[in-house]
Image: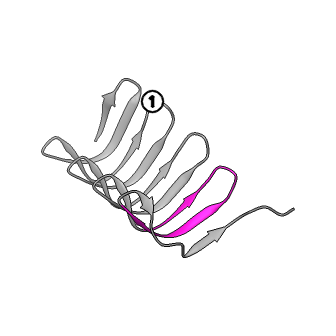
Amino acid sequence: MSKQIAAGSKYAGEWRNDKRHGKGTHTYSNGDKYVGEWLDDKYNGQGTYTWLDGRKYVGEWRDGNFNGQGTFTIADGDRYAGEYRHGKWHDQKEETNDDTA
């Protein structure tokens, strides 16, 4: 089911008790997009958030924050892969830089 959330913002996916719940895609009015799992109207489980400026986070979420294993890619191609807690990089497992110079 698709529903407009706010002006220019749209959600297509599963609902429970009038909250985003299950799998769905939210496209924000500024061009950002989240595709993944929801629990009680928050990102929760596996998901991908893509910012209009090219940044991207792919991984686990809890209560709307990066939480668990994931990869954050900056627009210039640098990646930070590892463990995140409460929306912050916790474990410096892997950092890659796409600079070829």
Give yes or no for residue 77 being in the magenta stretch.
Answer: yes
Label 1: which residue? 29
Give the residue drawn at x 65%, y 49%.
75
Residue at 83% from the left image edge and 64% from the top image edge: 100
Q: Is residue 1 or residue 27 the one in the foreground?
A: 27
Q: Quadrant of the N terminus?
A: top left
Say what amino acid the circle numbered 1 marks.
Ser
- Point out the residue furthest to the right here: 101
- Does residue 98 appear to the left or right of 39 in the view shown? right
**Residue 97 relative to residue 19: left or right:** right
Residue at 37 percent of width and 34 percent of height: 10
Asked if residue 9 is positioned above or below residue 84 in the image, the reply reads above
Eyeballing the image, is 84 above or below 57?
A: below
In percent of width and height, residue 14 lies at 26, 49
Per the rendered image, the range of residues in magenta is: 69-85
Q: Main secondary structure of the magenta part?
A: strand
Q: Considering the image in quadrants, where does the C terminus appear?
A: bottom right
The quadrant holding residue 59 is bottom left
Residue 12 percent across, percent down from the top left: 34, 42
In magenta stretch: residue 42: no
Name the residue rendered at 54%, 72% in the picture.
92
Say left or right for 12 vs 16.
Answer: right
